[in-house]
Structures are given as structure tokens and as C-alpha cells.
Image (cartoon, helix red, strand yellow):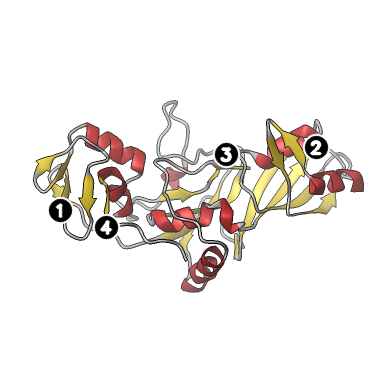
């Protein structure tokens, strides 16, 4: 099983664990002097906190642990998986219901990718889902600018080496082909940055569309593009079984969002 978070943790991590904001947002709030611990302003994000005892306030308002929320989204293409963007580009947060608590992406999809994206304010759960030691399978439907043949499929199954990384697939199959392009189903159990795009580019081909359709036993189904829904108890339990049964990784939530998936 995964180890439990110790009672004494850093102040920034405490705010994230309580579901108030992300680690990076917490760092900014603390350094701006907007967070107090036991009535005193603290500017050290690593200030030790006893979650079961200490009282934290942000801008004078007490922070209590939020109810844990687990959401799936059908991310549209062209939106960033980030809270805000300096260039003013659209982000997935514009799609979330304002009544929801702060949620962090559990893994990411790049701007040009679409499909199933998980969000939660449970940072430890998110760390288990994205931990590479769990080898949680993710399935993608990928359109490429080439009529795929058996040699390409076999090469993708065998894997390629790119920028020092060995990139491989769990499974690859042909969904359908047209006169000039093909749709592939690619299943990964590793999470290298932009992995599928890098593998396709290795063969001097282009990805035209990339849609994530499942994460482990969780399927996108008929969820409309740009909408969200809560995970059912059965869906969350199925993910929990898979991520706690494989290996014994320690959950260490990162300060920001997890790395970008293919």
C-alpha cells in the first residue's frame, strides 16, 4: 500500500492537501504574506505544519479541508491544461463549474490533444494515478497523415529511442484507414513527455488528431466535448484497486501540474 502523508508537512503542501489551491499557488500566497499559521504571518513555504492541530488562514479566512472531488472532463483541442496563461489563451478552467472547489489536473494533455482528463483536489490520489510505477494503461485514438501498414505498426510496438528516452507502446492496432491517413489505437503504460507525438515524428510522420479515450478501466464514453462529470463510486474504486495493487510507490505530489501526456 501507499504510505500515508506524515502529520508534519510543509505549509505549501498543507494548503494543497487541504484542497485550497495548487502547490505553486500556495508558494505564491505564502511569499506574498497572505498566509498565517496560528495567527502569525508565515513566508516560508516549507514551514512545518501539523495538519491535525495547527490553524491556517489565508487573507484572514480559516482554511478547512475540502470534500474530496473526482471529476472527468472531455478536453477540447486548443485548450491549455493550466490554471492561467500569460498570453491569455483558453484554459480548461473556463469549462469548470464555479461551484466546484479548486481542482488540479491529474496528468495533462497538451494544447493540441483532446479527450479524457481527470481533475481532483485529492493530491495524494492524483499522485497515485500518475505514478509510473503503477503502469496504468492509457488508450489513445490517433490520426496520422499516412496509410499505416504492418511494418509501421510493428515498429511502433517495438519502440524507438528519442532524446535519450526509450519510447514504447503496450499495444498498437489499426482502427481504420482512408486514402491518405489512418486512425490507430495506441495503448501506453509509460508517461514520457509528448510520447506519441515523438514516436510518430520519429518516422517522419505527423499526428493530425490525438484523443485519449480511456485511463485504466475509466472510459470517456459519450461525455460531450467540453463538459465534465463526477466519477462514480464504482469508477473511482476500480482505479484505486489498480493503483494500490501494483508496487509500493510513495505518493509525493508535485508543486505544479504533472508532466504533459502525449
Among the two numbered marks 4 and 3 on one chain, the one whose residue lies closer to the N terminus = 4
Residue 146 appears in the rendering: yes
Is 180 rendered above or below residue 171? above
Among the two numbered marks 2 and 3 on one chain, the one whose residue lies closer to the N terminus = 3
Determine whether the residue tagged by mark 1 lies in a helix, strand or loop: loop
- Percent position (x, y) of residue 248? 51, 61
- Look at the image and tell me in which quarter the C terminus lies: top right
The residue lying toward the viewer, choosing from 9 and 19, is 9
The residue lying toward the viewer, choosing from 211 and 124, is 124
**Residue occupied by mark 2:** 145
**Residue occupied by mark 4:** 7
Asked if labels 1 and 4 touch by Cβ distance under 8 angstroms, the answer is no
The mark found on residue 55 in the picture is 1
Farthest residue, direction left? 39
Q: What residue is drawn where x is 22% and y is 50%?
A: 49
Q: Which is in the foreground here, disc 2 or disc 3?
A: 3
Q: Residues within 10 Å of mark 4 (few under 14, many from 20)?
A: few
Is 139 rendered above or below residue 10? below
Amino acid at each position: 500500500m501507499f504510505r500515508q502523508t506524515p502529520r508534519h508537512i510543509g505549509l505549501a503542501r498543507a494548503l494543497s492537501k487541504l484542497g485550497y489551491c495548487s502547490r505553486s499557488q500556495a508558494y505564491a500566497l505564502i511569499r506574498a504574506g497572505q498566509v498565517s499559521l496560528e495567527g502569525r504571518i508565515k513566508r516560508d513555504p516549507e514551514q512545518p505544519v501539523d495538519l491535525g492541530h495547527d490553524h491556517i488562514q489565508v487573507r484572514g479566512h480559516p482554511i478547512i479541508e475540502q470534500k474530496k472531488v473526482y471529476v472527468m472532463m472531455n478536453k477540447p483541442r486548443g485548450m491549455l491544461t493550466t490554471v492561467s496563461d500569460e498570453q491569455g489563451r483558453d484554459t480548461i478552467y473556463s469549462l469548470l463549474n464555479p461551484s466546484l472547489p479548486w481542482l488540479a489536473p491529474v496528468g495533462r494533455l497538451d494544447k493540441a490533444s483532446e479527450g479524457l482528463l481527470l481533475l481532483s483536489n485529492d493530491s495524494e490520489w492524483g499522485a497515485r494515478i500518475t505514478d509510473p510505477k503503477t503502469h496504468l494503461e492509457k488508450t489513445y485514438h490517433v490520426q496520422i497523415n499516412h496509410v499505416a501498414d504492418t511494418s509501421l505498426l510493428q515498429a511502433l510496438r517495438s519502440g524507438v529511442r528519442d532524446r535519450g528516452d526509450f519510447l514504447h507502446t503496450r499495444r498498437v492496432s489499426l482502427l481504420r484507414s482512408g486514402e491518405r491517413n489512418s486512425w490507430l489505437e495506441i495503448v501506453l503504460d509509460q508517461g514520457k513527455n509528448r510520447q506519441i507525438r515523438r514516436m510518430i515524428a520519429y518516422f517522419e510522420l505527423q499526428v493530425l488528431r490525438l484523443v485519449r479515450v480511456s485511463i485504466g478501466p475509466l472510459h470517456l464514453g459519450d461525455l460531450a466535448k467540453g463538459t465534465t462529470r463526477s466519477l462514480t463510486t464504482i469508477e473511482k474504486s476500480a482505479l484505486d484497486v489498480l493503483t494500490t495493487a501494483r508496487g509500493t510507490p510513495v505518493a509525493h505530489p508535485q508543486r505544479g501540474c504533472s508532466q504533459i501526456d502525449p
